[in-house]
Image (cartoon, helix red, strand yellow):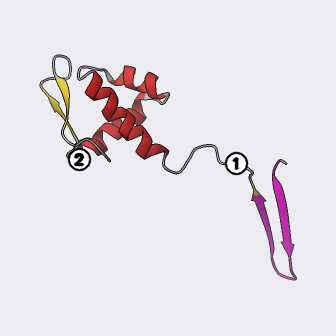
Amino acid sequence: MGNKIKFDIDSDWFNVSIKRDTVNAPVNAPVNRLNKLLDLVKSDNKITISKIAKKLDVNEKTIKRDISKLKESGKLKRIGSDKGGHWEVVWEGI
């Protein structure tokens, strides 16, 4: 079907609306990604940020932001150093 374009014109204004048939990413994608991240950490508590990013098909900056959210909310914590430590899932669901 493609995009649908609607023009509304009156004497002083005009408005253009474009409707897409599909949306690229579901609204709940970030929540699903956080749950998947927790699952990955549960299965391998020494997993690296780069491996998580590859498995979830996002960039490392997104994973770092997600980890910060999970840490701030008390759902994930880091035990030990960045190189020698490991992750601990504190709370199972989002």
> What type is the residue that disc 1 sits on?
Thr
Of 50 and 74, nearer the camera is 74
In three-dimensional space, the C-alpha distance between marks 2 and 1, rounded to whole angstroms, equals 33 Å
Pinpoint residue 85: horizontal percent, then vertical percent.
Answer: 16, 21
Label 1 secondary element: loop
Q: What mark, if any, has residue 22 been given in the picture?
A: 1
Q: Magenta segment, principal secondary structure?
A: strand
Locate residue 67, reporting x and y percent. 30, 37
In-front residue for pair 70/8: 70
Q: Which residues are magenta?
A: 2-18
Residue type, label 2: Glu
Residue identified by numbered label 2: 72
Label whose residue precedes the other's in the sequence (2 or 1): 1
Rendered position, 82 above or below 39? above
- Residue at 74%, 52% in the rendered image: 20
Which residue is depicted at the point 24% across and 49% down?
A: 73
Residue 66's x, y, as percent? 35, 40
Relative image position of residue 10 (x, y in whole percent): 86, 80
Q: Residue furthest top?
A: 84
Indicate left or right for 86 with 2 as reference.
left
Left or right: 1 in relation to 19: right
